[in-house]
Image (tube, grey):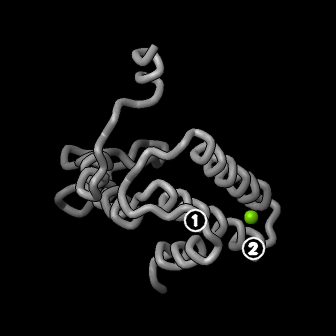
Amino acid sequence: MHSSPARLVREFHLAFGLDARTTPTEVSQELAAHRGELLAEEAAEVAEVSVTGPLDRLAHELADVVYVAYGTALVHGIDLDAVIAEIHRANMTKLGPDGRVSRRADGKVLKGDHYRAPDVSEVLRRQGWEEREPLSVREHTDS
Ligand SMILES: [Mg+2]
């Protein structure tokens, strides 16, 4: 494993004068929407080549998704490595204490009694996030 994409993507953003924040921050709707569109474009490219290939195209588009996702996290001041670690921690609690995986008949991994859901809010608070009400709530109460 090479170093986290976070460092590389930060280097890219700084070199090209793109936004790079160090504390979780709600950004302008325009910027947030722009980042969402970039990611949707890359995800669509993955979907396009997933079945048809070739494999090098798939690898390229998967890397684009990750790169843009890390960039979007950076724009919002989110340490994405820490969030991924929390998601991983939660996923691993799907294992039973005996190290066995419980599955449904169709193969889906079940969340057993030891499952502990990810707490992404807590991860962001540790990064300095001051949580506000979601925009949809604020819109109804501001006017
Ligand atoms: Mg692409």
Q: Identify whether 93 is placed above or below 131.
A: below
Q: Residue at (41%, 58%) from the top-left corner?
A: 78
Badge 1 crowding class, 10 Å Cα cut-off, few under 14, some 14 to 19, many 20 or more, is: some
Quadrant of the displayed image that contains ligand 1: bottom right
Residue 122 bears which disc, if any?
A: none
Q: Residue at (24%, 49%) from the top-left corner?
A: 122
Q: Is residue 16 left or right of residue 137?
A: right
Q: Identify whether 57 is placed above or below 28.
A: below
For the residue with label 2, is its CB less than 8 Å from the closest atom of ligand 1?
no
Name the amino acid, label 2. Leu
Q: Is residue 119 left or right of residue 40?
A: left
Badge 2 crowding class, 10 Å Cα cut-off, few under 14, some 14 to 19, many 20 or more, is: few
Name the amino acid, label 1. Val
Circles 2 and 1, Cβ within 8 Å, touching? The answer is no
**How far across and down, in percent of the image, does residue 19 sit?**
55, 61
- Residue most extreme to the bottom: 2
Between 59 and 121, the one nearer to me in the picture: 121
Q: Residue at (50%, 46%) from the top-left corner?
A: 27
Q: Mark 2 = which residue?
A: 55
Q: Is residue 61 left or right of residue 68?
A: right
Between 125 and 46, the one nearer to me in the picture: 125
Q: Residue at (17%, 58%) from the top-left corner?
A: 97
Q: Mark 1 = which residue?
A: 66
**If you read the primary sequence from the N terminus, does the residue marked by circle 2 or circle 1 appear first?**
2
Between 142 and 36, the one nearer to me in the picture: 142
**How far across and down, in percent of the image, does residue 83 sit?**
36, 58
**How far across and down, in percent of the image, does residue 133 sit?**
35, 30
| Mark 1: secondary structure | helix
